[in-house]
Amino acid sequence: MCSNGPELRRAGALTRAQEGAHRMRLRLVEIEGTPEEIARLDIEHLLGHPIPAPAVALYEGAPSGQANGPDGNQLARILEREAPPGRALALLEQFFEAVTGWGDVSVVPSWRAGDPKRVSYLRVHRHPRTRGAFVYVFPGRLRLNFRLGSDAARGLTHAVAREVKVDNAYQVSLMLVDDETLGEALRLAELAYELVAAPA
């Protein structure tokens, strides 16, 4: 029994040494804030490299000339469930058909905490992702918030500058109610789409 003691102690010391050599450091960070406040953090940019398109995106634009797959159908079902029926739904469908047609765009839902089948808003991203979404769409309210400075709303008929802090990235908002607002929304979306790809 005595001879086994040192061997056990040596084995134990070796195990501790091995554990020390393979120790992994893990830092947990908790961030609290509204979606817009968190979006201002530009987490993707802080990581130092762009995030590729998600493996499980709700919808990614189909290549030119190809029909939308099941993900496009899922987006359609979400819009039918969340948007007011009739013309409002058609306007949202036209908006998403246009922006996802740009090719490197994905739509990511934010599910309601109390009801995982309902969506609070949809984030529209350009890939590779180096910044946040270029537009947030709130289908139930037909409101779109664009990742643009307040100056982008100057001279426009329907878009308005939001009353938010100066460091809020989403300073322009628009209510999608008719063909004229749809045209303005697409112009703003294209501007925001180009800006998220610009060097920081």
Image: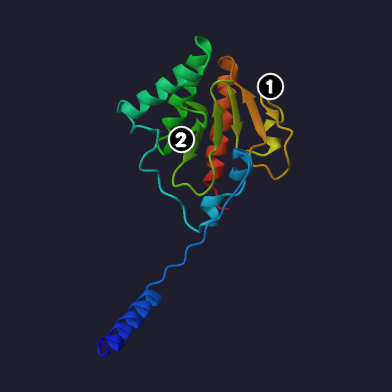
Q: Residue furthest top?
A: 86
Q: Residue furthest front?
A: 1
Q: In the rendered picture of this protein, how many numbered marks are placed on residues?
A: 2
Residues 102 and 30: in front is: 30
Secondary structure beneath disc 1?
loop
Q: Which residue is mark 2?
A: 108
Rendered image: mark on residue 142 = none
- 89 above or below 146? above
Q: Which residue is mark 1?
A: 157
For this view, does 119 lie left or right of residue 19? Answer: right
Question: Which of the two discs, 2 and 1, labels the residue nearer the N terminus?
Answer: 2
Picture coordinates of residue 12, whole percent (x, y)? 33, 80
Q: Report the residue at 53% width, 38% height from top.
A: 193
Q: Quadrant of the N terminus?
A: bottom left
Picture coordinates of residue 176, whole percent (x, y)? 58, 20
Picture coordinates of residue 31, whole percent (x, y)? 59, 49
Label 1 neighbour load within 10 Å: few <14, some 14-19, many 20+: few
Q: Are marks 2 and 1 in contact (CB under 8 Å)?
A: no
